[in-house]
Image (tube, rainbow, N blue to C red):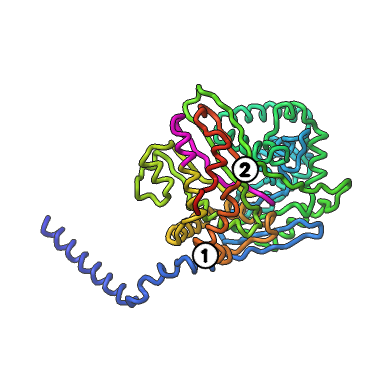
């Protein structure tokens, strides 16, 4: 029996070997790996589907990228966030986002939730300092239903008194949760001190006293003042047909007005102030600190160089391990000397300004050293960064940017944000060329402009007794040698 099985196995092996030889014979060696060659980086960014843009008569923009997949993401990107609020109604944009899902003139809250669930879709929203976003993820065949729902919730929300009172409690609980996220707390403090006295200095959720007093009239007034055609982008990515979406947009958003009944709201410039804010609590286990300088706005030509510089600083976490061979000199220093638990560089952009800096978490005894090494690294960017480091950072930046566009939702978000910031979607080849144009000389020039001898903004929370005095921090923003 065993001999018979062995013969069968040997015969099968010969057949497979013959089949394999025939298969390889059919494809010359030069063509065998052509499919792998076709997936080169250059070909990939050139083969990204075109972003098509149309504009309705009332100014609503429709922008799509059709990748042909069976699902899609469609959303409304509205140029209205907490920056458009006043001290009196701060928090109303976020409150309005919560109220959008509490029922409309056509759908009760239960009907809305059931309709979304029956589609197998996901409906969500978020508010930032400059934008409010409502979006849905669904099957491509359900795109008309999703657009209908998005149209309904921003134009026909009931904003009932009972729902407002109920949601008031939800938002207050959300504020308590945010207060436990110390990174969010530090960045709110950082904005409060860096842009003090301006709209960007206020938080997105607003103060407790405002949440307790916001009423229906405040919500209606905000919608009537800011939800205007020229300030709305309907973006979609995935399996979407542009012409079909334009027809849907005309049907559902064509009645949105383009003009203003009262004075046209203008975006006031937000003045940056080098300063600090400290919230000392020695009972907390770790110190959370952010150092920043004023960065560039979205459309500023220096922004690309600042993005590369941000990548050069990098990020690190103690759980990553690593040592002297880490790409980031600051990360290598932290790993070898146990300076902190984690750090991350950031480049937060707004229309006309931004914050560029570093956030870290450390033991209370290492704060001073960590601040010293961060600022030393900043000075090195201004004076002696090399082309080798810059080229490595550029490659990492391009990789991260492409990885962030993996899926219909991040692509849709990229389209919506860029349409509001630039009024167009920057093609990937153009973006790559802009990144490639940055070299060590450009980094030194831009960092000298934005970092060297500038007044920093500092925010610290926790056991921060060792956080250096502000005058010392300011004095570390330059070297006596160049």
Q: Nearer the viewer, mark 1 or mark 2?
A: 1
**Percent coordinates x, y for residue 458 in the rendering:** 58, 38
The question of residue 105 being in magenta is answered with no
> Residue under circle 1?
436
> Residue under circle 2?
118
Q: Residue furthest front?
A: 480
Give the SS element for disc 2: helix
Packing grade of label 1 (10 A; few <14, some 14-19, many >=20) is some
Q: Residue at the location (55% across, 36% down)?
A: 183
Q: Is residue 323 above or below residue 308?
A: above
Q: Is residue 68 above or below residue 340?
A: below
Q: Is residue 63 above or below residue 136?
A: below
Of residues 158 and 360, the one drawn nearer to the viewer in this rendering: 360
**Percent coordinates x, y for residue 305 in the rendering:** 56, 57
The question of residue 369 being in magenta is answered with yes
Can you see residue 440? yes
| Sequence order check, earlier mark of 1 and 2 | 2
* Quadrant assignment for the N terminus: bottom left
**Percent coordinates x, y for residue 164 in the rendering:** 75, 30
Left or right of 67? Residue 104 is right
Which quadrant holds residue 322?
top left
Which quadrant holds residue 91?
top right
Of residues 465 and 288, the one drawn nearer to the viewer in this rendering: 465
Q: Residue at the location (49% across, 61% down)?
A: 440
For marks 1 and 2, give the CA distance.
47 Å
**Percent coordinates x, y for residue 326 in the rendering:** 38, 49
Packing grade of label 2 (10 A; few <14, some 14-19, many >=20) is few
Please give the range of residues in magenta. Answer: 352-372
């Amino acid at each position: 029996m065993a001999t018979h099985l062995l013969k069968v196995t040997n015969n099968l092996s010969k057949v497979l070997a013959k089949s394999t030889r025939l298969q390889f014979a059919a494809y010359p060696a030069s063509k065998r790996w052509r499919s792998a060659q076709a997936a080169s980086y250059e070909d990939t960014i050139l083969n990204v589907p075109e972003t098509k843009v149309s504009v309705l008569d009332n100014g609503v923009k429709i922008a799509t990228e059709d990748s042909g997949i069976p699902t899609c993401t469609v959303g409304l990107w509205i140029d209205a966030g907490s920056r458009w609020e006043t001290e009196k109604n701060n928090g109303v944009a976020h409150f309005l986002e919560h109220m959008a899902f509490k029922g409309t003139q056509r759908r009760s809250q239960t009907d809305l939730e059931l309709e979304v669930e029956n589609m197998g879709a996901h409906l969500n929203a978020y508010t930032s300092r400059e934008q409010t976003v409502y979006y849905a993820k669904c099957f491509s065949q359900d795109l008309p239903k999703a657009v209908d729902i998005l149209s309904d919730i921003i134009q026909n929300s009931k904003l009932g008194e009972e729902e407002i009172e109920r949601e008031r409690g939800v938002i207050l609980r959300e504020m308590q949760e945010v207060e436990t996220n110390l990174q969010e707390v530090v960045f709110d403090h950082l904005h409060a001190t860096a842009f003090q006295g301006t709209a960007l200095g206020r938080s997105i959720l607003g103060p407790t006293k405002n949440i307790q007093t916001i009423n229906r009239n405040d919500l209606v007034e905000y919608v009537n003042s800011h939800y205007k055609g020229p300030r709305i982008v309907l973006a979609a990515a995935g399996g979407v047909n542009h012409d079909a979406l334009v027809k849907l947009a005309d049907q559902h958003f064509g009645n949105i007005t383009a003009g203003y009944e009262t004075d046209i709201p203008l975006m006031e410039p937000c003045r940056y102030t080098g300063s600090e804010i400290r919230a000392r609590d020695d009972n907390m286990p770790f110190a959370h600190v952010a150092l920043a300088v004023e960065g560039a706005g979205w459309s500023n030509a220096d922004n690309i160089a600042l993005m590369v510089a941000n990548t050069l600083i990098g990020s690190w976490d103690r759980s990553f391990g690593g040592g002297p061979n880490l790409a980031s000199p600051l990360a290598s220093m932290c790993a070898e000397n146990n300076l902190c638990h984690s750090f991350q560089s950031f480049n937060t952009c707004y229309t006309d300004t931004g914050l560029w800096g570093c956030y870290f978490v450390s033991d209370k005894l290492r704060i001073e050293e960590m601040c010293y090494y961060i600022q030393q690294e900043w000075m090195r960017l201004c004076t002696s960064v090399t082309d080798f480091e810059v080229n490595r950072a550029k490659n990492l930046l391009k990789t991260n940017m492409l990885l962030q566009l993996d899926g219909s939702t991040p692509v849709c978000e990229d389209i919506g944000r860029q349409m509001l910031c630039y009024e167009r979607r920057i093609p990937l080849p153009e973006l790559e060329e802009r990144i490639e144009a940055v070299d060590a000389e450009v980094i030194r020039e831009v960092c000298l402009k934005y970092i060297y001898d500038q007044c920093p903004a500092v925010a610290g929370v926790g056991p921060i007794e060792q956080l250096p005095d502000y005058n010392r921090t300011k004095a570390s923003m330059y070297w006596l040698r160049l």
